[in-house]
Amino acid sequence: MSPVCFAPDSGGGGGASTPAPWGETKVVGARLPRVDAYERVSGSAVYTLDLQLPGMLHAAIVRCPHAHARVKRIDTAKAETMPGVRGVLTGESPGAAIPWYQGREGPLSLLFDPHCRHEGEEVAAVAADTALQAHDAARAVVVEYEELPFVVDPDKALAPDAPKVHDWGNLLGQPRVTTRGDVAAGFAAADAVVEMTFRTPVQMHTPMEVHVSVAQWDGDRLTVWDSTQGVYAIREALAGALKLPLASVRVVGHYMGGGFGSKLELGKYTVIAALLARRLGRPVKAALTREETFLVAGNRPSNVITLKAGAKRDGALTALEARLSGPVGAYPTSAVSAYQIGDLYTCPNVKFETTNILIHAGKARPFRAPGFPSCNWALEQVVDTLAEKLGLDPVELRLKNIPTVSQLNDNAPYTSTGLARCLTEGAVAFGWTEARRRPKTAGHLRRGVGVAAGMWGYGGDPNATAIVTLYADGSVNLNTGASDLGTGTKTVLAMVVAEELGVAPDRIQVEHADTATTKFAPSSGGSQTVLVNSPAVRAAAIEVKRQVLEIAARQLDKPVGDLAVADGAVVVAGAGGKRVPFSELKGLGERRMLVGVGMRHPHPEGKLALPFAAQFAEVEVDTRSGAVRVLRVLAAQDSGRVMNRLTFNNQVFGGVVQGLGFALTEERVLDRATGKMVNANWHDYKVPTMLDSPAEAECLPIDPHDTECNTVGAKGLGEPAHIPAATAIANAIHDAVGVRPLEAPVTPARLVALLAAQERKG
Amino acid sequence: MLPSFAYVRPTTLKAAVAALAAPGTRAHAGGTDLLGCLRDRVFPADTLVSLAGLPELVGVTPTAEGGLRLGAMTTVATVAGHPDIAARYRALAEAAAAVASPQLRNQGTLGGNLCQRPRCWYFRGDFHCARKGGGKCFAVDGENRYHCVFGGETCFIVHPSDTAPALVALDALVRLAGAGGSRVVPLEKFFVPPSADFTRETVLEPGEVLTEVVVPAPPAGARSTYRKVRARGAWDFALAGAAVSLGIEGGRVKHARVVLSGAAPIPWRVPAAEQALIGHRLDGATIARAADAAVAGAEPLADNAYKVPLLRCAVEEALTALNS
């Protein structure tokens, strides 16, 4: 008999056998520490950056120091003779003329493009025995540049005489207008109208682990270890760049030190490592320095958002009209999202225009809910202002406009929405009404409270495959292609197996994120990891359980319906029922393993499964120094089922602190005279510290018991935990001191200026 | 990436001074600033001369005159946590505690904190600026939100140290050892403004080492404090700050030092603010006058006008704290 026995029809994809929703769960939802917590905190976990292969060389990349320049000449002679140097790669090297960044009419650039369109663009690379030698040699490569005029200010990039990033200009496509209803009529019908213009900063991802790849060849087959959010996406892009069959490329991404969206796409350093490794016949590691990551590994674009909103006396929105623009950097991507303007609230008349601008700066990459926090900064401050004008409680006004359908998607209903509950139950848990009633202090330390709601607009990819294998001793292998960015994916997926198969989580080994040994999973991004992979894992575990029960039924001569699994054993129903540990199942002993393959079940037809949130913040503003202290935050999150309360809280608190950075401290600064980034390091680019984090942070899960979204009832969390965080702080600042912080981050400099202007106005 | 360099660790001050007389050498104390400068190619070094083999440079001891001697290699954390300093030189203890982060305070030294190089992002970054011999200040018309509002000329850095303004306010002296013996300099005269020489921050000559800081006995009725305003709670230099040291007798201010941080290329002492205090009771009106005087004549750049109210606030809050 074959050791592998599975029947996709009975456990895998296809709606026919969709398992019933979980009732009360034993493992799922518990506060289970990460399955790899010890490895991560003890230092024994081998991240890509830690990887050492025998004979491995180190690459360093020569980068353009100018915002815009043309390479006239590269002289590598000196670098090639330096100690430890094994090879130098330029655009002239065989196989290095690789197109990069697709435009509408073909590639826009090259791996080493002599036309450098932003500071940090790749010009050449060196491989040496040590990283220090490689960097010394990279500095010894002599490059002659013709400096060209540049534009890094998006406000100036569309001027007719602005230097062009590409021949066709600095406007990426045409401004896109989306309309619903009649905004003019909507404003005419409004009792209050508000219009404001907001500015948000360029925020940097700054994951703990820098961007890094190690490449090794075996004949024509390439293995790459990569600090990536998705091994399958990287494999496709890498195979495409090197013109290799998918089957010849293996991408591995085990321990991973964060990405926030910056590690979804193939980096040039990965291809550079592969080219050098092939040429030199040795493995090559290419690790960016922290400074390099600031220049070339993506960012959240700044936004300028003008938003006009109208509402009736009772708070019902009548119209929303917005213009959003932002710089994508030097190559195409998207800089803005008006999604929440179109869909967070019920509003019959909506119009928004989005504009993407090219500038001579590093290309943006998706960053924790691309476009959403910036849009939220505008929308939720405008909604707050409307409430103030109408004399309504901000929570009350929001509750007046809760949709149950997606207006942007032909009014398709949501499988569930806990938005109203997030607002009402969050307000109660926060003590919102009491806090608002508290008299404002007259001194220089002023307290205020704010709320912001938010939603995320992506429900996940349709496909993922997982394999669960039960071995003869009762231990289990869970095989999933999913990457664990440090968020606890491995732990949550193991808990799904434990729940379904009745084995302890510590009996489950997770094998993941390796294109050679696991099956397809989409990249861990878009808040989809749990909701896409858990159903596949559950299906695989159910299939193994089916086989276990079948074997046990034969052995015990009982109907399957009388049997269940618990604590690593088959249990016969009834008081004092017999208990047979998996290791004593004869059929399993013969086969040595039982294998179940599970696939994700299709999305519910005609419906959307999306997460919602409302966050509340209390701040103390020092009106003399402009310092803002976030005293406490309560995050009410409808992300469906809580899979693990510990990792759930971690995601939420991380999202809140990253939002706090957006609101108060983080901002890329480009020098206006040279176009170069002046704060490309972890000191000058100010990520909040523990002392800046809220002293009190509470997480309130709102679970609408969604039985339609997927077979585990979980919705996305990583992004909705972050989206409203900054705006809740902004609204609390306004409540405290009465000024509207239109521009983020609200630094002491900006707040002192706002307060001075307020005083002048009296 | 850190460039390669030679490393020596002399065990006598004489040997250290001799080693430092050679060109291309740099003194290595805690290294928290030096190694960053080397990694960022702010300046080169062929040889680092470690001061870690000189135990006589570590420690806090009373002087015969009733003051304290602080060895230059004493860590910032030790200064922050020393009971005598907290009791008698509160501004220094508070300033030391406000430096950087716990890790950096454990590794960084008091001498290093006084001798650290400017944090101007053009000086630290890939810009050939005036202070690095490039003949041009990028900040004066550039991104200057963190730059000076007093004392800028050719170069517009702010002095990064928190302990320096506190020590100037406490009338500290520093001992500098060189090949020909040692000299003692008031800390206030240790720092070089750009108007005198924009390529150096201190009077240290090549081959000279700062070996100790001496704070004299506090004046009668002494009280002092340091107030720092910053962009985030840790690991951040002052946006604005004030070290204030007063001697109050019979309810009136007899002795006053007001020194601003985050304001100027050197710790910025403001005699006008001190004059506004001396002879007066430390009441609200006096405090307001002194705070106004502290920022009179500020010359903000395009992006740093916010510093003026912040500095005023720092002085006001420091004085108010001393009044309670």
Image (cartoon, helix red, strand yellow):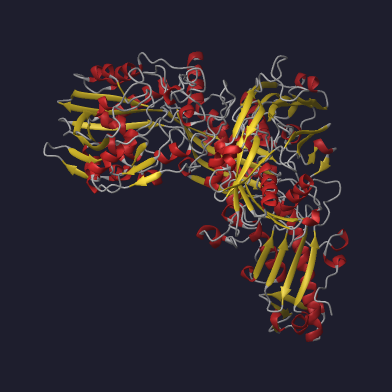
In which quadrant will I find the N terminus of chain A? bottom right
- Give coordinates of residue A54: x percent, y percent: 60, 60
Residue at the image position 16 percent from the left and 37 percent from the top: B67
Relative depth, front residue between A381 and A395? A381
Query: Does residue A358 lie above or below A218 as drawn?
Result: above
Res A518 seen here: yes
List x then y, in percent, for residue A237: 76, 46
Residue at 82% over, 51% down: A603
* Closer to the camera in the image, A716 or A73: A73
| Numbered-mark total | 0
Q: Residue at x 35, y 26 (%)?
A: B200
Whether residue A432 appears in this view of the structure is no
From the viewer's perspective, is A166 left or right of B141?
Answer: right
Q: Quadrant of residue A659?
A: top right
Horizontal placement of A470 versus B314: left or right?
right
- Left or right position of B162 against A52: left
Q: Is residue B215 above or below residue A188?
A: below
Residue at 79% of width from left, 39% of height from top? A406
Image coords of residue A69 (percent x, y) = 65, 26
Q: Which residue is farthest left? A: B64
Q: Position of residue A460 (x, y in %)?
A: 76, 48
User: In screen coordinates, is A159 left or right of B179?
Assistant: right
Residue A222, located in which quarter of the rendered image? bottom right
